[in-house]
């Protein structure tokens, strides 16, 4: 196998395409499952941060401090360190520390705090007069959330979720380097360690294409729901 020069990136006969498509599906699966959980958990955390940020209640202030600390701590830990840190918890929750399923706790815990901050920012950017108008008309807190906060901030929420999803795709590649499967695992084991530059290149191109598709879908959805 010639591993020297640019030609080493284009020796496609050295690619096991069945393994490549299998790894692609693992990456897509990890991203989809993670982003669904992150969207729900991040939205709840962001809403909690928003609702308790200006409250005069001492308990609300304490809750805001606790949630903020959780979000800030896990948002600050580099992903590769977080994976190692969570290995015992992953083993307990998932029954394994290898494979796509084992990557889910780290992916979710790393991305949910990041998205929670984006959700909180999106809620704070809503015109406060709109919220006050709904409140003056007798709307309950749940009605304000469902009929004012969420609809008004939806373009920003979808845009933030798109950014989070793209970050998760990159995280899956890093998780793959320590045995989580997917394109990152294939690029590291069958590409880098086997000195097969073609596999590394093809895996990289597929990841870039997934990112482009995710960004395009997110931008298209934002344009459709943005009524401004």
Image (spheres, rainbow, N blue to C red):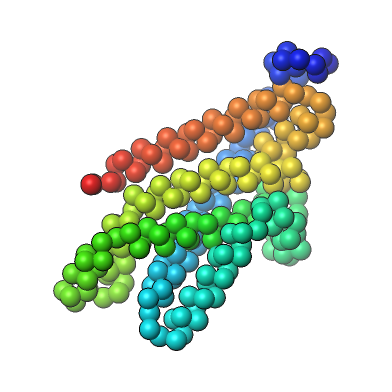
The percent position of residue 209, horizontal first and vertical second, equals 54, 30
Q: Quadrant of residue 53?
A: bottom left
In the visual, does 216 lie left or right of 83? left
The percent position of residue 165, horizontal first and vertical second, equals 51, 46
Q: Quadrant of residue 95?
A: bottom right
Q: Residue at x 31, y 72 (%)?
A: 142
Q: Is residue 145 above or below residue 151?
A: below
Q: Is residue 34 above or below residue 199?
A: below
The percent position of residue 213, horizontal first and vertical second, equals 47, 34
Q: Residue at x 49, y 56 (%)?
A: 115
Query: Is residue 8 in sight in this rendering?
Result: yes
**Where, quadrant-wise, is the N terminus in this rendering?**
top right
Q: Is residue 184 above or below residue 75?
A: above
Query: Is residue 15 in sight in this rendering?
Result: no
Q: Residue at x 45, y 38 (%)?
A: 215
The percent position of residue 87, horizontal first and vertical second, equals 75, 59
């Amino acid at each position: 196998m010639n591993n020297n020069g640019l030609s080493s990136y284009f020796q496609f006969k050295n690619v096991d395409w069945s393994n490549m498509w299998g790894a692609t599906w693992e990456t897509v699966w990890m991203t989809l499952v993670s982003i669904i959980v992150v969207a729900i958990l991040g939205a709840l955390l962001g809403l909690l941060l928003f609702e308790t940020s200006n409250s005069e209640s001492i308990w609300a202030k304490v809750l805001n401090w606790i949630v903020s600390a959780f979000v800030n701590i896990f948002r600050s830990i580099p992903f590769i360190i977080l994976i190692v840190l969570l290995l015992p918890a992953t083993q307990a929750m998932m029954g394994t520390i290898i494979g796509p399923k084992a990557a889910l706790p780290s992916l979710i815990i790393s991305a949910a705090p990041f998205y929670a901050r984006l959700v909180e920012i999106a809620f704070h950017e809503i015109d406060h007069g709109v919220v006050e108008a709904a409140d003056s008309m007798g709307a309950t807190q749940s009605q304000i959330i469902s009929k004012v906060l969420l609809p008004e901030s939806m373009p920003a929420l979808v845009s933030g979720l798109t950014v989070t999803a793209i970050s998760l795709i990159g995280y899956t590649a890093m998780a793959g380097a320590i045995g989580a499967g997917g394109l990152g695992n294939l690029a590291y084991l069958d590409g880098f360690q086997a000195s097969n530059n073609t596999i590394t290149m093809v895996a990289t191109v597929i990841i870039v294409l997934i990112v482009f598709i995710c960004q395009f879908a997110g931008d298209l959805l934002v344009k459709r729901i943005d009524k401004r």
